[in-house]
Image (spheres, rainbow, N blue to C red):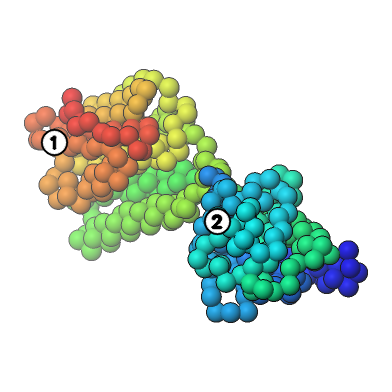
Amino acid sequence: MEPTLAASALSAATEITTAALSGGDPAMVLDSVVHQAAELAGADLCVVMVRAEDGTVSVEAAHGTHSDDPRGVVLPAESAAGQVARGGVTVVADDMTTDPRTAPYVPAELRRFGPFAAAPFGAGGRVLGALAVYRERGGRPFDQATVEVLTAFAAQVGVVLALAEAANDRHRITLYQERERIARELHDVIVQRLYAAGMQLDRVRRRMRKRFAGTDASRLGEAIDQLDETIEEIRHTVRELRSPEPEAEQPPATDLAESARAEVRIAGELLGFPPTLELSGELADIPAERADHIRAALREALSNVVRHSGASETRVTLVRDRNEVRLRVRDNGAGVPQDVQTRGLRHLEERAKRAGGKFYLNSSPSLGTLVAFELPLDERAGRAPISPG
């Protein structure tokens, strides 16, 4: 290998390694790769081609002496670049438009070129694709020394970029896990405390209504409304923290039975009697996103029992079968006032619709109230009409 050329390749690879491992923009790093490789090989064009699952390769970055930009060009798996990306062996042609290994696969965008060399972009199990260089037709073919330097450069830089991508993925997953921890603490601790405080204040307001001056009662009502708004804002923050979710890591499953017991216990303290809780099926491994919807529906339903029903009996039923989770909250109270139906429970119907489930409310002064909320365990599953029973 020619010493000067090898030294230039080492310097270029070091520069790219520093940029990649320091978290540089991947597009800019690839642009640097093709620019450096074109200079090392004395090429009129250099491209990085990335291999897809079906074996095809597509041009992701390009640098050339002309304005033509072949980015986006896709070559079949049978092409020389496709074979390089799959087999990890460098291919060299004096004229790719006449060489039988390459001629059948030359796209129109590259027919102006002749001398061609393609090296694996990466090494071993970390081959991402191919690094290819071209010279104008009639130009000097790539000599062995240049091909050796190009092959070494492509292998080193490709592995570095694969490692950097893996490191970024690990960092992204770690960051998501921390966001999920914060979101769950907000959801499970802070919201629950605010909810309990709001229920206590509302209970005091209803019991002391006659003793409050109009201004004091109004201020207390405003404080309760502000707590409700704060809870909703925290829930919105939780949703933002949990999105987007990386495919490589899923949030842990939730024990929905324990969550239901906690919600019922708080409601019982505020009602003055313990609601009946019936659990059926395996509730310890519900996907976290599904469990959060059910828990929010239970909390909202019990909140309305506490605030508006005047009930002496409340029954909570939570059932999980193979396909779905079903929640029912029944009380024997005076029903939900019309203004609360449209204001307080509307978001549950919207939540169920967004999550692929169903929400049902049946309320009257003589029969009490039934709140039903059902979700499929798989958010992609179709839904049958909900039964009010």
Q: Residue at x 35, y 54 (%)?
A: 232
Amino acid of disc 1: Ser
Instruction: From the viewer's perspective, tell me whether residue 250 is left or right of residue 346.
Output: right
Is residue 284 among what the camera can see? yes
Q: Position of residue 225 (x, y in %)?
A: 29, 56
Cβ–Cβ below 8 Å for labels 2 and 1?
no
Label for residue 203?
Answer: none
Q: Earlier in the sequence, mark 2 or mark 1?
A: 2
User: Dot 1 lies on which element?
Assistant: strand
Q: Residue at x 40, y 36 (%)?
A: 291
Residue identified by numbered label 1: 363
Which quadrant: the N terminus? Answer: bottom right
Which quadrant: the C terminus? Answer: top left
Residue identified by numbered label 2: 105
Instruction: From the viewer's perspective, tell me whether residue 304 is left or right of residue 9.
Output: left
Q: Nearer the viewer, residue 296 or 164?
A: 164
Q: Residue at x 37, y 23 (%)?
A: 322
Residue 2, above or below 350: below
Q: Nearer the viewer, mark 2 or mark 1?
A: 2
Residue 238, above or below 257: below
Q: Position of residue 38 (x, y in %)?
A: 70, 72
Instruction: From the viewer's perspective, tell me whether residue 185 is left or right of residue 158.
Output: left
Residue 200 occupies quadrant: top left
Q: Residue at x 11, y 29 (%)?
A: 367
Q: Position of residue 214 (x, y in %)?
A: 20, 61
User: Dot 2 lies on which element?
Assistant: helix
